[in-house]
Image (cartoon, coloured by chain):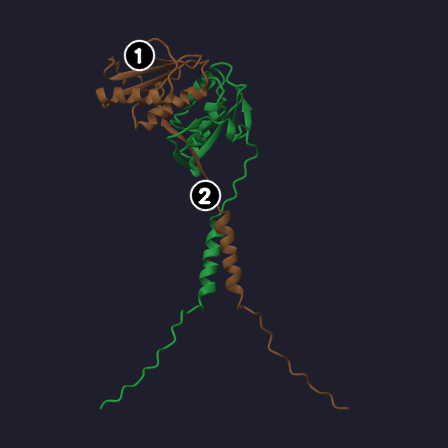
Chain colours: A brown, B green
C-alpha cells in the first residue's frame, strides 16, 4: 500500500486583525484612564512664630492696610469693628471689591471662632480667592 | 498635432503596515501610565465636603490626606487620632516624617463641612510646627 505524504500547510498566526484589537484596547484605556487630581482651595500657612524668634517684627496695621473678617460661632461675620451680621456671598464679594478699591494690596485676616463651622471659613476664603486676593491671613488661634 | 496622452493617475495609498506598531506603542503608554488609586476607605464622603467656586487642581503625587470628621477624629494614613491637648503631637510627628520623605508635601484636608473650626485650627498649628505649610482644603465644585 502506498502511503501518501501529507503536505504540511505553513503554520501562521493571522495578524490582520491585530491592529483592530490594539485600537480597541487603546480606546478602553483612554476611556477609563482618569488623571486623578485633587481639587480644593490651596493656601500657604505662615511659619510657626517660635522658629522666627529674633527676626519677628511687630507691625501695626491700620484698617486701610488690613481688613479683619471675624467669623462668629453662629456663622455671622464681623467686618473690622462693625456689628456682626449674616453676609451672603454676593454681598461679601461686593465688600471685598470695595476694600480692594481703597487699597489694592489689602490684607484680609480671617479669624474664625473655634465653635464656628469649618464650611463658613471655607466660604469666606473661597470668596477672597474668587476676588484674586493673594494676601490672606488665616488665624490658627 | 501633439497627441494628448491620458496620464494614468496613481492610486493613493496610506501605508498601514506600521499601524499595529503605533497602536501597541500607544497601548503600552496607557498601560504604563495608568495608576489605579486605591484608598482603603473614604472617611469623609465627597458630599460632606464644603462647596467652593474658586478651586485649584492639586496634583496627587505630593499630597498627603488628612481627614477631619465631625466628631473631631483626625485620620492620617487611616490612623485615627484626636488632639486633646498641646502634648498630643501625633499629627506633627507624622508630618515631620512625611516632610523628610517629600519636601514638596502638600497636606490636603478632607474635612466634614460641619466640623468645628477649633479642631482644624489645632491641626494647622501642628502643621506649622512640622513646617508643612502648603495646605489645600478639598471642596466640591459649586454647580451653577
Label ID, residue A35:
2
- Residue B49 x %, y %: 48, 27
- Residue A95 x %, y %: 30, 19
Q: Residue furthest front?
A: B1
Secondary element under disc 2, as helix, strand or loop, is loop
Q: Is residue B123 visible?
A: no
- Sort mark 1 into few (<14), some (14-19) or many (20+) by Cα contacts within 10 Å: some
Q: Residue at x 36, y 77 (%)?
A: B10
Q: Residue at x 51, y 47 (%)?
A: A32
| Residues marked 2 and 1 touching at CB (< 8 Å) | no
Q: Residue furthest right?
A: A1
Residue B118: image quadrant is top left
- Sort mark 2 into few (<14), some (14-19) or many (20+) by Cα contacts within 10 Å: few
Question: What is the CA distance from the residue labelled 2 to the residue labelled 1?
Answer: 43 Å
- Residue A72 x %, y %: 41, 12
Specify whether B43 is left or right of A80.
right
Give the residue number, with chain letter if any, for mark 1.
A80
Image quadrant containing the N terminus of chain B: bottom left
Q: Residue at x 40, y 36 (%)?
A: B57
Amino acid at each position: 500500500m502506498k502511503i501518501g505524504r501529507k503536505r504540511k500547510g505553513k503554520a501562521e498566526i493571522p495578524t490582520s486583525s491585530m491592529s483592530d484589537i490594539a485600537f480597541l484596547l487603546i480606546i478602553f484605556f483612554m476611556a477609563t484612564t482618569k488623571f486623578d487630581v485633587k481639587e480644593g482651595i490651596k493656601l500657604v500657612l505662615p511659619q510657626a512664630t517660635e522658629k522666627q524668634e529674633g527676626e519677628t517684627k511687630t507691625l501695626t496695621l491700620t484698617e486701610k492696610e488690613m481688613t479683619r473678617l471675624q467669623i462668629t460661632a453662629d456663622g455671622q461675620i464681623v467686618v473690622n469693628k462693625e456689628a456682626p451680621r449674616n453676609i451672603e456671598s454676593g454681598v461679601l464679594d461686593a465688600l471685598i471689591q470695595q476694600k480692594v478699591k481703597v487699597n489694592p494690596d489689602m490684607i484680609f485676616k480671617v479669624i474664625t471662632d473655634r465653635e464656628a463651622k469649618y464650611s463658613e471659613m471655607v466660604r469666606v476664603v473661597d470668596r477672597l480667592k474668587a476676588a484674586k486676593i493673594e494676601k490672606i491671613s488665616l488665624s490658627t488661634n | 498635432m501633439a497627441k494628448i496622452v491620458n496620464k494614468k493617475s496613481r492610486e493613493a495609498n496610506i501605508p498601514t503596515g506600521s499601524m499595529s506598531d503605533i497602536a501597541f506603542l500607544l497601548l503600552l503608554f496607557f498601560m504604563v501610565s495608568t495608576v489605579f488609586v486605591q484608598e482603603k476607605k473614604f472617611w469623609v464622603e465627597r458630599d460632606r465636603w464644603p462647596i467652593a467656586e474658586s478651586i485649584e487642581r492639586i496634583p496627587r503625587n505630593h499630597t498627603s490626606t488628612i481627614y477631619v470628621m465631625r466628631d473631631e477624629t483626625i485620620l492620617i494614613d487611616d490612623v485615627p487620632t484626636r488632639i486633646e491637648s498641646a502634648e498630643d503631637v501625633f499629627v506633627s510627628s507624622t508630618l515631620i516624617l512625611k516632610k523628610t520623605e517629600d519636601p514638596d508635601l502638600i497636606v490636603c484636608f478632607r474635612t466634614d463641612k460641619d466640623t468645628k473650626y477649633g479642631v482644624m485650627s489645632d491641626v494647622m498649628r501642628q502643621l506649622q510646627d512640622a513646617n508643612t505649610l502648603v495646605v489645600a482644603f478639598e471642596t466640591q465644585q459649586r454647580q451653577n
